[in-house]
Image (cartoon, grey):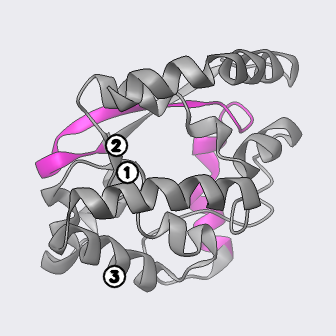
């Protein structure tokens, strides 16, 4: 119900975003990425394309260049693969709006840990694997607690706190905080 309402309300913005992506250069309007969801099931997560075509091929180079020993790779500030229009969409999380279709299909929830790629999930220890006990979400506790500015360990800790202490009230609070966080655009890149 919430996802349907969100898609109806966001439809004009999504149309503008689709046009903006089309005008920003070659490549598809939407980008799909295989992600790992509830209990390790795979699904295709949908986003508006915010990067240049072929950006996935450069992930290894960015991880290596960062010098980060941790195999979990979130976002890189000033990522050279992101288009100028993509930066605007990411600043306000507009690129994530098509994931409401993933919610309608039952692959994601509105609130939950963000879905990860196989490379990241394969590096999980037993503690991190508990993130897979709930459906991944469009937003979650770490998104409203610092977004991409958080250290990976803090983001995972917040995800585990969410999984272990889930409540409908907490979900409503996270949704309300998400709106505030997105409008302020702190930690988004």
Residue 167 against residue 71 in the figure, above or below: above
Residue 32 against residue 189 in the figure, above or below: above
44 left or right, relative to 69: left
125 left or right, relative to 179: left
Kindly identify the residue that appears in the image at 82 percent across and 22 percent down: 20
The Cα atoms of the two marked residues, 2 and 1, are separated by: 5 Å
105 left or right, relative to 146: left
The residue under label 3 is 157
The residue under label 2 is 35
> Can you tell which quarter of the image residue 88 is in?
top right
The residue under label 1 is 117
- The image position of residue 185, as x and y in percent, is 74, 59
> Can you tell which quarter of the image residue 119 is in?
bottom left
Which stretch did the figure color magenta? 36-65
| Residue 73 appears in view | no
- The image position of residue 1, as x and y in percent, is 32, 25
The answer to the question of whether label 3 and label 1 lie on touching residues, with beta carbons closer than 8 A, is no
């Amino acid at each position: 119900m919430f996802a349907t309402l969100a898609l109806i309300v966001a439809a004009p913005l999504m149309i503008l975003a689709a046009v903006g992506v089309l005008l920003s250069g070659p490549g598809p309007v939407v980008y799909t990425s295989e992600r790992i969801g509830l209990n390790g099931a795979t699904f295709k997560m949908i986003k508006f394309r915010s990067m240049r075509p072929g950006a996935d091929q450069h992930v290894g180079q960015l991880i290596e260049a960062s010098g980060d020993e941790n195999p979990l790779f979130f976002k890189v500030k000033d990522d050279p693969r992101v288009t100028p229009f993509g930066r605007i969409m990411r600043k306000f999380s507009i690129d994530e709006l098509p994931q409401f279709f993933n919610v309608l299909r039952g692959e994601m929830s509105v609130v939950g840990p963000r879905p990860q790629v196989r490379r990241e999930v394969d590096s999980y220890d037993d503690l991190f694997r508990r993130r897979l006990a709930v459906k991944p979400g469009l937003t979650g506790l770490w998104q409203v607690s610092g977004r991409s500015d958080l250290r990976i360990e803090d983001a995972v800790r917040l995800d585990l706190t969410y999984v272990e202490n889930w409540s409908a009230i907490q979900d409503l609070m996270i949704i309300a905080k998400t709106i505030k966080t997105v409008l302020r655009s702190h930690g988004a890149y």
